[in-house]
Image (cartoon, grey):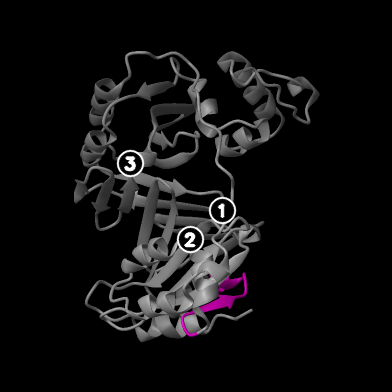
Amino acid sequence: MNATVQTPAPALATFNPDSPRELRDAWHALTAQKSLRIRDAAQQLGVAEAQLLATGIGEHVVRLQGDWRDLMMRMGELGPVMALTRNDAAVHEKDGVYTNISHGEHVGLVLGDAIDLRLFYDKWTFGYAVTETTGTLTRRSFQFFDACGDAVHKIYLRDASDLFVWDALCEAWAAPVQIAGEKVLPRPDARPAERPDDEIDLAAFQADWRAMRDTHQFFGLLKKHDLSRTQAFRLIGTEFATPLHIDAPARLLQGAAEAGTDIMIFVGNPGCIQIHSGPVKDIQRMGPWINVLDPGFNLHLREDLVAQAWRVKKPTADGIVTSIEIFDAAGKQIAYFFGKRKPGIPETPGWRTLAESLETR
């Protein structure tokens, strides 16, 4: 069914979002008025990012088709690239090479020294190879989206990337039909209803929390007791979860930079989690964003979208493991932070001191 989208600009008064030509014209008219990234332009036009991108199919965009697991197994052949994973409030960018790649039926792992990913392929619906030229600058990327047209993961080529491999992968995974436009599903409700607190067996939940011996068991704990992450934190009590002031991520990043504390930064969406492990150094504020602008690693975090911050303690075989976790107003996780560690090694005193120093609410 055709829909009409209202925008502030007179030139964009009405357009049919199901028409790639009309949508592209509306996009160009919007960006002629002000510079906008494609995700922000899509939001203003009331469409999904994949729908905007797909208006360029047959020109600078190639629709991809096939088993994403097989394609991702080839990404290491590109050499140095930049991996980008984001959600509405955080962008995580990491330079490196895709190495140590493995896949199950639905979940993939990339465990390189720099690029560290968890890939949830049941959420990967659309894929594109994109060539963007601005003046003398050309950027090439692979971009993947969920069924609602929201980006799950992007891979940008760098100067040292292998263009012959790029061409070969684009040709091998190109869909037979290269017609502009894409159909996406409507987004689900922003905040699913939580189970009422009085239906939770609190004693059993608390006992299971205390019995954890690995942080990965936490996901099973939530599923067993049918709890959202923030509901679990609220119910477990301050022995294990303490609400923090919402400036916690900025204070954490600045404190880690000043102390030289190695940390782990997780940013994800339903289709991908991307991890940085190591130091952070150059911390800068730009408008509502707090940024890490280090060689090989950038983090961009919208402080004004942080509605909840928690200091969380999980029992493990290596002792308590502390995380700082932040959420938006809909209860969606924006990012979470740990001290840098590996299984079998306790968290460092420096990380624990930094986490404990953050102001409570």
Q: Magenta span covers which residues?
A: 239-251
**Cα–Cα gap, marks 3 and 2:** 20 Å
Q: Which amino acid does label 3 sit on?
A: Tyr
The answer to whether one can see residue 17 in this image is yes
The residue identified by callout 3 is 121
Count residues near mark 3 (Cα–Cα under 10 Å), then give few for <14, some for 14-19, many for 20+. many
**87 in the magenta segment:** no
State the SS at label 2: strand
198, 149: nearer the viewer: 198
Query: Mark 1 highlights which residue?
Result: 89
- The answer to the question of whether label 2 and label 1 lie on touching residues, with beta carbons closer than 8 A, is yes
Position of residue 79 measured from the top left corner of the image (x, y, whole percent): 24, 42
Q: Where is residue 107 in the image (x, y as percent from the top left)?
A: 28, 47
Question: Disc 1 marks which amino acid?
Answer: Ala
Report helix, strand or loop for mark 1.
Answer: loop
- Between 307 and 358, the one nearer to me in the picture: 307
Q: In this view, does 193 lie to the left or right of 298?
A: right
Residue 276 horizontal/vertical position (percent)? 37, 60
Q: Quadrant of residue 174?
A: top left
Q: Residue at x 35, y 50 (%)?
A: 95
Q: What residue type is labelled 2?
A: Ala
Residue for point 48% across, 16% down = 180
Q: Distance between the residues labelled 2 and 1?
A: 9 Å
Instruction: Looking at the image, tell me whether mark 2 or mark 1 is earlier in sequence order.
Output: 1
Marks 3, 1: nearer the viewer:
3
Residue sitting at 25 percent across and 34 percent down?
A: 71
Judging by the rendered image, the residue that carries numbered circle 2 is: 335
Locate the C terminus and report the quarter of the image it occupies.
Answer: bottom right
Nearer the observer, 283 or 109: 109
User: Within the magenta stretch, is there residue 249?
Assistant: yes
Q: Residue at coordinates 60% horizontally, 33% vertically from top-left? A: 42
